[in-house]
Image (cartoon, coloured by chain):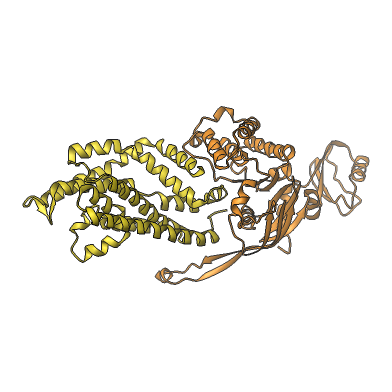
Chain colours: A yellow, B orange
Amino acid sequence: MRTWTLVGAWARSHSTHRADIWARSILPMLQIYVLIQIWSGAYRTQSHLDGISYGKTVTYLCVVNMLMWLNQSTIPWYVADRIREGKIATELIRPIPFPLQVLSHQVGYTIARTTALAGMIPVAVVVAGLEAPATVGLFVVSALLSYAVSVGLYGLLGSAGFWLHETSGIVWAFSLVNAFLAGSFIPLALFPPGVREVVELLPFGAMGYTPAAIYSGMVSGAAAVQAVLVQFFWCVTLVAVIALVWRRAERGIVSQGG
Amino acid sequence: MVKVEDLVKEYRRQKRQNGLWRLWSREYSVTRAVDGVSFSVGEGELLALLGGNGAGKSTIMKSLTGILTPTSGTVEVAGLVPWRQRKKYVPHIGAVFGQRSSLWWDLPLMDSFTIISRLYEIPVANYAKNLQQLIDLLDMGSFLETPVRSLSLGQRMRGDLAAALVHEPSILFLDEPTVGLDVFAKRQIRSFVAEINRTQNVTVLLTSHDIDDIENLADRVVLLDRGTVAYDGDLEALRLRYSPHRVLKVRLADEAAVTLSNDTVEVSQSGSSVEIAFDPRIVSVSALIDEINKGYKIADISFVEAELEDVLARFYSRDDA
């Protein structure tokens, strides 16, 4: 209940920057446009690539990039900012554990961002050719899990802020690797055999590829269920690791300044 | 209410090294920010922690609010160990950390109060009554609906003070509450703190560099010096100990050169204005005035207490420092 109060507060707080959210939504749309241009080149001479149709690839690219945009995390910046400015003091004395406050901020931010989907989805359907989902139920579960894995991984990066004075370099590098390994540019299904199997087991695919592949029908049936289970595994693992890390961080907190 | 015994806090800091070597070599140095501090604060007391930069004030405040885990020593506030029983502890305390606001930047001030009341699960009736009182005392009625980012610093500080008190804590920690404020805003905040301390019996622990804050608010001061308690007592005794001199300012009707019988007084004169520094424990004021009155024509006379700022400056520059 108290956590929801905070989520609501942050959602309202971020919604005051609606223009900024809409402006930021242009970037993934541009990325989708550029990627479709590139992929249409690959499909010029053949209707299917590894058994995947052009339509499926376009749908996949739209979904994966919109999801990755929606899953974007504020956590490392939020934590770093709190530590650097010493503001963490004011939040540590609140009757809610700090990690829950960080999570509330993230969820509030995402809620404020979902409003931009109202513009993004119609554009993706009309301009790019986004198709209807192959399955709805499993996609929704997978999309929610992708969010949880994303929050977990960025949460872990955020915790590094307690030990390192500057995390922005690591976060940028991580985001770049993440975008590639989560399948933002190339679906993991088209990765070379050998590489693909390994990457599919890493948490990156769980953040974007899995739900987008289920939506577009690139992955279905038992393989889809298995992919969702991998996502679930990462969720549980990350929550456990973060709990451990936070317990250590709590003991050594040093907020900067004064 | 507050009991601190042998509090020690050491910080481990990475040593700065030159060149690329530092990327993979780690050497640490240990700094003792607080070195065996003990003091206690009674219920309803208003205590100021004083000390220069790096004296350990903030570290003590952070240990008392449960943000920092000390290296050793014990702290008990309201019968609880702040950093160990944080969840049970935080409803008892309110805190304002100088410039670091606890309000929601983009939302109207009123929203921050509502959010905080829900976080502390304050019953609606209590909240409404308490908030109204805070709004009146801090004169916040005119800017309750203004987003925090558009408030002036003085308004925001008042908002932060109210936010720290919405849940009716029994102890209030104020770390530099008036830093950066104009004279009027400072006064407003001081009189508010004095008021809640007096009428609601809220125990207040204050750190400040502002001498007026301390002179106007604190019953008792704890003076810190490089992590240890150098003085614990009331202001008057501190004045006497570190700055026993008082100054008698005399303006003469003529420009007669002043000489006095007691050689412990220091006379400095420029034309008709004379400043006489004396120790009231050795020379009584009345005897001094008598002597001047008999020997010279006085146009005006005034008596100056030692400024706390001078007292502190003397304290920090004392021989054993």
Asked where in the image residue B153 lies, by quadrant, the reply is: top right
- Residue B6 shows in the view: yes
- Residue placed most toward the observer, B113 or B293: B113
Q: Measuring 67% from the left and 54% from the top, which residue is drawn there?
A: B80
Relative image position of residue A47 (x, y in whole percent): 8, 50
Toward the top, the furthest residue is: B142
- Residue placed most toward the observer, B269 or A126: A126
Relative image position of residue A238 (x, y in whole percent): 40, 58
Does A257 sit left or right of B75 as displayed? left
Q: Is residue B228 above or below residue B119?
A: below
Relative image position of residue B187 (x, y in whole percent): 67, 36
Relative image position of residue B1 (x, y in whole percent): 72, 51
- Residue B93 shows in the view: no
- Residue placed most toward the observer, B279 or B106: B106
Q: Measuring 69% from the left and 36% from the top, which residue is drawn there?
A: B191
Asked where in the image residue B288 lies, by quadrant, the reply is: top right
Q: Measuring 44% from the left and 72% from the top, which residue is drawn there?
A: B25
Toward the front, the furthest residue is: A222
Asked where in the image residue B182 lies, by quadrant, the reply is: top right
Does A188 sit left or right of B34 as displayed? left
Does B73 sit left or right of A213 as displayed? right
Task: Count the labels in the image.
Answer: 0
